[in-house]
């Protein structure tokens, strides 16, 4: 596992020790950042990212490397992601880690421009999380949701499907949140 682009391109990340963590592949991350560049432009310096079910933290740390102003990583178990966050001591002001369950988390008044969500497959957590994070989203927030390729995912009210793609065992749903 490594950072695929930006300031820290090629930097190796620590692979997760837990079997419960399933990092998004390098290939899928690269494709997703190409999609982000097409939708948002190549300068990410004004954007804030929320990574829900962060796991290893690879996606958020990739976003930080590629220039996002701030990344917030949210997971119930931050053991694996904390190891990777420590690899970026010069970026500690851009990285916020929240150890919490999606059902009980309370975030500050931050509003996010982009959300990445990779819930444990086939547990029904994606729809719950999309509902819970609504208060922290700006109008037109782009949501990137990874689910298992055969998993159904009903977007809650307020979300519009933009695109859907498959990468190996994963299905990526791109949605836009409108207030």
Image (cartoon, rainbow, N blue to C red):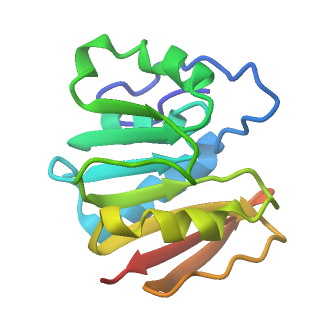
Please give the name of the residue rendered at 26% of the width and 66% of the height, measured from the top-left corner. 40
Relative to 40, is 49 above or below?
Answer: above
Please give the name of the residue rendered at 59% of the width and 72% of the height, measured from the top-left corner. 173
**Relative to the observer, which residue lies in front, 104 or 6?**
104
Residue 20: which quarter of the image? top right
Relative to 92, is 35 above or below?
Answer: below
Please give the name of the residue rendered at 82% of the width and 61% of the height, measured from the top-left corner. 122
**Residue 132: x %, y % from top left:** 49, 64
**Relative to the observer, which residue lies in front, 58 or 117?**
117
Q: Is residue 138 found left or right of 168 in the rendered image?
A: left
Q: Is residue 76 found left or right of 166 in the rendered image?
A: left
Residue 156: which quarter of the image? bottom right
Report the number of discs.
Answer: 0
**Residue 66: x %, y % from top left:** 31, 40
Please give the name of the residue rendered at 67% of the width and 21% of the height, measured from the top-left corner. 15
Q: Is residue 156 visible?
A: yes
**Relative to the observer, which residue lies in front, 8 or 72?**
72
Residue 86: which quarter of the image? top left
**Quadrant including the N terminus:** top right
**Residue 79: x %, y % from top left:** 60, 20
**Residue 171: x %, y % from top left:** 70, 66
Q: Is residue 172 visible?
A: no
Relative to 172, is 3 above or below?
Answer: above
Q: Point out the residue furthest to the left here.
A: 46
**Quadrant including the C terminus:** bottom left
Q: Point out the residue furthest to the front here.
A: 104
């Amino acid at each position: 596992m490594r950072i695929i682009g930006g300031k820290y391109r090629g930097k190796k990340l620590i692979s997760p020790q837990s079997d419960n963590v399933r990092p998004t592949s390098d290939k899928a991350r690269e494709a997703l950042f190409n999609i982000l560049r097409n939708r948002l432009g190549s300068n990410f310096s004004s954007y804030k990212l929320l990574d829900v079910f962060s796991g290893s933290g690879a996606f958020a740390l990739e976003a930080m490397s590629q220039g996002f102003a701030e990344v917030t990583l949210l997971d119930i178990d931050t053991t694996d992601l904390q190891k990777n966050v420590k690899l970026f001591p010069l970026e500690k002001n851009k990285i916020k880690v929240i150890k919490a369950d999606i059902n009980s988390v309370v975030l500050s008044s931050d509003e996010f421009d982009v959300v990445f969500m990779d819930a444990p497959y086939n547990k029904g957590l994606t729809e719950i999380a999309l509902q819970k994070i609504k208060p922290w989203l700006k109008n037109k927030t782009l949501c990137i949701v990874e689910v298992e390729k055969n998993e159904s995912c009903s977007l809650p009210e307020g979300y519009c499907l933009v695109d859907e793609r498959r990468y190996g065992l994963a299905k990526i749903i791109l949605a836009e949140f409108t207030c």
